Every structure is written in C-alpha cells, then in structure tokens.
Amino acid sequence: MKISKSMVAVAAATTLVLAGCGADSGTGGGSANATADGEALAQEAAEMVDEYRAVPTPDDLGAPIDVSELDGETIYSIPIDSGAEFYADGETAMAEVAAEAGVDFVTFPSDGTQTSYQQGIQQAINSGAGAILLNGPLPETLGPQIDAARDAGIPVVPLHINDMEDETSEGLEYEAFAPFNLAARLMALDAIAHHEGAPVNALIIESSETGPAEDMVGTMQQVLDEFGPEGSKATVMNVAVPQWATRIQDEVQSNLLRDPTINAVLPIYDNMATYAAPGIQQAAGGRDVPIFTFNGTPSILKMVADGTVAMNVAENPDWVAHVNIDTAFRAMLGEEPVPGVSGPVRVIDETNVEETGNPPRSGEGFGDEYRDAYRELWGLS
C-alpha cells in the first residue's frame, strides 16, 4: 500500500460515480439480464482469469549474484505500520530470507507517522546499515533523510509502493515493485465472469491517499468498459485508511440501499473486505453481491473458504520477501537492478482455496520452487 502525505488528514468518505459502458444496469445478480454478447464477453473474461489460478513459476529472476561478501551486513526495514498484518508477515519473511545469506535484518517499529519513518532512517544510518528498505513509506516524503543515507553510502530501496509497470522512484536506482494494476484487472474480469453476461454494477472501495488507488480504480473502470456487458458501470466509494473500521460498513450499506442494482463489491485492499462484508449482509443479504479483492491476507482467504469473499488476487509475502531481499542484495553489491521486478499473484477462489491451508496460512499455495531458485541465484546452493 502506498500512502501519501495526505494520509495524516483524515478525509470523510465520499462517493463518486464514474460512467461505464452505457445505460444503467438492471437488477443485479445472476444472469437474468444476460445477452448473447454479454455471455461471450463473460466467457472471455473467465478465460483470462483462469490463467492465474495455477501455481506461479519462478521465471526471469535476474542475473545470478554472489552474496557471500554480504555476510555480517545489516539491512534496516521501515514498514508503513509495523503492526499491520500484511506488513508484519512480510517483515518476518524478509528477516528469514536475509538470514540465509548471513545478513542481519532489523525492522524499525514504525507507527504510520512521518516522525517514525524519519527516526528509522536516522537509526539505520547511525547503525551503519548496508541498505535501508522503505516498506510502504513514500520516498518523496523523506527527501532529506534519503539524502543523508546516500551521503553515508547507504542505498535506500522502496518496496511494494509502485506498480511493476512504473518507473523507479525519482532519484533512486533500486526498487521492488508490486502487481497492483494486474490485480485490479483480474478483480474486474472475475466480476464480469461471475455474472455470466449480465451487466456488472460494481461498487469499488478505494483509499485515494494510497498511491496505487487511482490507477487501480482506472484499470477496473477500463476493464468494465472493454469487457463488461452493455450497461456495466462502477460507483467509487472513497474511505481514508484510518476510517476503514468506522466507515466502510456503513458506507457500503448506504450505497447498496441507495442503488439496489449493485451486484459486485471490489475493495482495492483485502482488509477492507472485513468491514464491507457485514455492510453487504445488512443491506443485500438476499442478493448476489460477491466481493473481489487483492492481497492474500490469511484472514481474508478464510472468508473465501467460507464463501463470504468470492475471489482474492493473492500475493505470497514470502515470495515478495525474496524479491525484496534480492533487490536489497543487488543494491548492496552495486549490481544491476532487475527492471520492474515484482512478486507474482495467484487467483484464489472456491476452486483452489483449500491449497492455502485449513485455516489458510500466509504464502501457502505458491509451491516451494521459488525458494530453491533464489538460493541458486544467490550462489547459496
């Protein structure tokens, strides 16, 4: 998740209606309003989603590197919020990966404030870190601190902030990216496939102060325009990150009561689904209003298993950790970065959710091949 300076200003939730493919849809759910053209589009969407249901393979990891000379070095990581489940899982995974090369890994206990990020970078500089990872905090908000790290000869590496098709953050050479727009595309395509040719009237939940939000929403809207049956459209509901627990349920409920034709809910981050699901139950308990979301958090995969969430575009925090640490190793060694490097995604739904464990576990369902591939890449096997 990419948070901007405006996160500190908690905005009230707002609703913006974006035009879709044409006229308003009819009653939502099922395929009652399906047309032959719509069914063909839904089938095409289903086929594109299906490509991502299989276990990913570790291809194109970059040129081999020798990490033996990094033994005894230290990597400092500054997560956007060290207490958030997604980031906590990732930090633990990165520590385990770094240890394989004899590299110490320190997670600074950040609390989501700029002050804590600044303190973390200064502590890393004072400790003589080999690299500093920005696991969520925006580099453009930490210019003086990054300059100080650069002056100390310490590379700063942003993680999981920009989409894999974006350029590296300005002024920095190394970055590990994320599949934000691919996830958004798959979410919208699966919503289309689910309704089997009927118009999709989607409620998208975003947090506009997070960096990926604008592009993710735009990608969903583009997919609805390109592949949605005639009459498909989207309503975008904006809730600031600190308000998720207090506003999402009520706002989802209000939108569903205001527009009974809404037949899909697409939260751009899966923790939003925790609060969206009861809002759907309160306002549309008898209607088919599935949730399609992104991240692969175990608690949300459990909601896939129990049928509360229809689909999750899952990441594997352990695989992402290998991508992140590989990027850090290359920065510390002065090796060429891997362009657009990102962890893969896997579509998890009722057809394969059992592969994530019972109950679902972080990173389960992605196989083990990538671990051996990275060890070989680093000269550790």
Image (tube, rainbow, N blue to C red):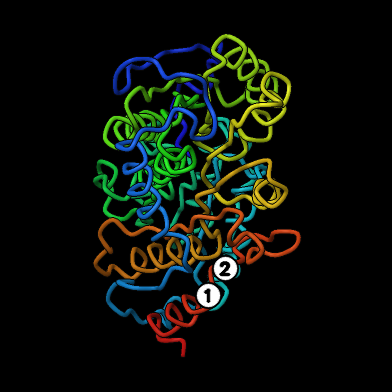
Which residue is the site of mark 2?
Answer: 104
Q: Is residue 41 above or below residue 25?
A: below
Which element carries disc 2, helix, strand or loop? strand
Residue 368: image x %, image y %? Answer: 54, 77
Task: Tell me where residue 364 sits by quadrant.
Answer: bottom right
Across and down, in percent, residue 28 comes to 52, 25
Disc 1 to disc 2, how far (Cα)? 7 Å
Label 1 sits on residue: 72
Q: Residue at x 45, y 65 (%)?
A: 325
Residue at image position (39%, 50%) is: 179
In this view, the residue in front, 258 or 243, is: 258
Percent coordinates x, y for residue 249 in the rendering: 67, 22
**289 or 118: nearer the viewer:** 289
Q: Residues within 10 Å of mark 1 (few under 14, many from 20)?
A: few
The one nearer the camera, 295 or 166, is 295
Q: Is residue 51 visible?
A: yes
Do the CB atoms of the residues marked 1 and 2 lie less than 8 Å apart? yes
Residue type of the residue flagged with mark 2: Asp
